Image: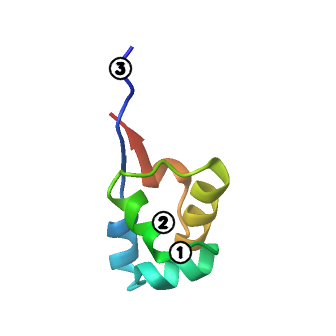
Amino acid sequence: MEAKKMTTKIKEFRARQNITQEKLAQMVKVRRETILFVEQGKYVPSLKLAHDIAKALGVKIDELFFFE
Protein backbone atom coordinates (compact mmCIF):
# COMPACT_ATOMS: atom_id res chain seq x y z
CA MET A 1 0.00 0.00 0.00
CA GLU A 2 1.40 3.35 -1.05
CA ALA A 3 1.75 6.10 1.57
CA LYS A 4 -0.38 9.18 1.08
CA LYS A 5 1.36 12.51 0.63
CA MET A 6 0.59 15.25 3.12
CA THR A 7 0.11 18.81 1.94
CA THR A 8 -0.39 21.89 4.06
CA LYS A 9 -1.72 25.43 3.86
CA ILE A 10 0.47 26.77 6.67
CA LYS A 11 2.25 29.16 4.31
CA GLU A 12 -1.07 30.60 3.08
CA PHE A 13 -2.39 31.15 6.60
CA ARG A 14 0.95 32.65 7.69
CA ALA A 15 0.87 35.07 4.75
CA ARG A 16 -2.70 36.17 5.53
CA GLN A 17 -1.65 37.00 9.08
CA ASN A 18 1.79 38.36 8.17
CA ILE A 19 3.55 35.78 10.37
CA THR A 20 7.07 34.72 9.38
CA GLN A 21 8.36 31.16 9.64
CA GLU A 22 10.63 32.39 12.44
CA LYS A 23 7.73 33.93 14.39
CA LEU A 24 5.55 30.83 13.99
CA ALA A 25 8.47 28.64 15.08
CA GLN A 26 8.89 30.75 18.23
CA MET A 27 5.14 30.53 18.91
CA VAL A 28 5.16 26.71 18.80
CA LYS A 29 8.66 26.28 20.26
CA VAL A 30 10.43 24.63 17.31
CA ARG A 31 13.22 25.69 14.95
CA ARG A 32 12.39 27.70 11.83
CA GLU A 33 13.66 24.81 9.71
CA THR A 34 10.97 22.58 11.20
CA ILE A 35 8.27 24.96 9.95
CA LEU A 36 10.01 25.12 6.55
CA PHE A 37 10.14 21.31 6.24
CA VAL A 38 6.50 20.94 7.31
CA GLU A 39 5.45 23.54 4.74
CA GLN A 40 7.43 21.74 2.02
CA GLY A 41 5.93 18.36 2.94
CA LYS A 42 9.37 17.00 3.88
CA TYR A 43 8.37 16.48 7.50
CA VAL A 44 5.06 15.19 8.88
CA PRO A 45 4.50 16.84 12.25
CA SER A 46 3.39 15.04 15.38
CA LEU A 47 -0.23 15.48 16.34
CA LYS A 48 0.86 17.84 19.12
CA LEU A 49 2.89 20.01 16.76
CA ALA A 50 0.06 20.05 14.19
CA HIS A 51 -2.33 21.11 16.98
CA ASP A 52 0.07 23.81 18.22
CA ILE A 53 0.53 25.23 14.70
CA ALA A 54 -3.21 25.27 14.05
CA LYS A 55 -3.85 26.95 17.41
CA ALA A 56 -1.14 29.57 16.76
CA LEU A 57 -2.72 30.38 13.40
CA GLY A 58 -6.27 30.34 14.82
CA VAL A 59 -7.57 27.55 12.58
CA LYS A 60 -8.55 23.89 12.87
CA ILE A 61 -6.03 21.16 12.07
CA ASP A 62 -8.15 19.91 9.15
CA GLU A 63 -7.98 23.40 7.59
CA LEU A 64 -4.17 23.17 7.52
CA PHE A 65 -3.28 19.58 6.68
CA PHE A 66 -4.48 17.33 3.85
CA PHE A 67 -3.60 13.85 2.65
CA GLU A 68 -3.71 13.11 -1.08
User: Which residue is denoted by mark 2 in the rendering?
Assistant: 34
- Tell which of 13 and 7 is nearer to you: 7
Q: Which mark is residue 68?
A: none
Instruction: Give the distance between the C-alpha atoms of the residues marked 1 and 3, in whole angstroms.
Output: 30 Å
Q: Is residue 47 left or right of residue 13?
A: right
Label 3: state its secondary structure: loop
In the rendered view of the protein, which quadrant contains the N terminus? top left
Q: Is 49 on the left-hand or right-hand side of 34?
A: right
Q: In the image, is 37 to the left or to the right of 45?
A: left
Disc 1 + disc 2, Cβ < 8 Å: yes
Tell me the CA gap for discs 2 and 3. Answer: 25 Å
Instruction: State how many labels appear.
Output: 3
Which is nearer the eye, 59 or 65?
65
Q: Is residue 52 above or below residue 45?
A: below
The answer for how far apart the CA atoms under marks 1 and 2 are is: 5 Å
Q: Amino acid at mark 1?
A: Arg
Q: Quadrant of the C terminus?
A: top left
Give the labeled residue for mark 1.
31
Nearer the N terminus, badge 1 or badge 3? 3
- Mark 3 crowdedness (10 Å alpha carbons): few <14, some 14-19, many ≥20: few
| Residue 28 position (above or below residue 6) | below
Q: Secondary structure at mark 1?
A: loop
- Amino acid carrying mark 2 in the image: Thr
Residue 50, by quadrant, is bottom right
Image color mode: rainbow
Name the residue: 53% across, 76% down. Answer: 25
Q: Position of residue 60 (x, y in %)?
A: 55, 55
